Image: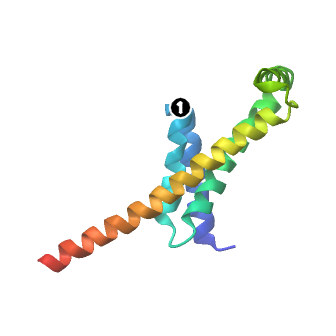
Amino acid sequence: MNRGYFLRFVAAVAVALGAHLLLGWVWSISGGVLIGWMSLSGGWWKGAVAVGTAWATLLAYNMIVAPGPVTEMHRLVASIAGDFPPWSAPAATLAIGIVIGLSGGIFGRGARDVFRDFRSRRTDAT
């Protein structure tokens, strides 16, 4: 694995985790935006993997720290949602994290292209 990619991946996961824990779950998109901005290609899937990894880490942490209450919460949420199996609640949570990361990666890559185009136009005008 490329060392530079690994460091960018770790930075994006750390930003997603930090933003999630300090600012709220919706801000975990910042990890996807970051890795999308830093990627030359494939920012969409890199953002999905980075934020998905951050959310999976939080799910695993919750299961390790309090397995009984978390399992009960998954069972209750799944039954309220429509009598689904208990594993569907964390699966849906992880899927939401992946979609958030995917959209952040797309946004970060697009913002990089727009900013680069804006900078090149500004440099050409002077």
Q: Which residue is mark 1?
A: 24
Q: Let me know if residue 8 appears in the view.
A: yes
Rendered position, 48 above or below 29: below
Q: Is residue 99 left or right of residue 29?
A: right
Rendered position, 25 above or below 76: below
* Amino acid marked by disc 1: Gly
- For the point 53% across and 37% down, the residue is 26
Dot 1: element: loop
- For the point 81% across and 36% down, the residue is 88
Rendered position, 8 above or below 100: below
Q: Is residue 14 left or right of residue 30?
A: right
Position of residue 113 measured from the top left corner of the image (x, y, whole percent): 39, 68
Q: Quadrant of the C terminus?
A: bottom left
Q: Let me know if residue 78 appears in the view.
A: no
- For the point 64% across and 44% down, the residue is 97
Q: Residue 18's image quarter?
A: top right
Q: Residue 79's image quarter?
A: top right
- For the point 49% across and 32% down, the residue is 23
Position of residue 104 measured from the top left corner of the image (x, y, whole percent): 51, 52
Position of residue 30 measured from the top left corner of the image (x, y, whole percent): 49, 47
- Density class for disc 1 (Cα within 10 Å; few <14, some 14-19, many ≥20) is few
Q: Is residue 123 left or right of residue 49?
A: left
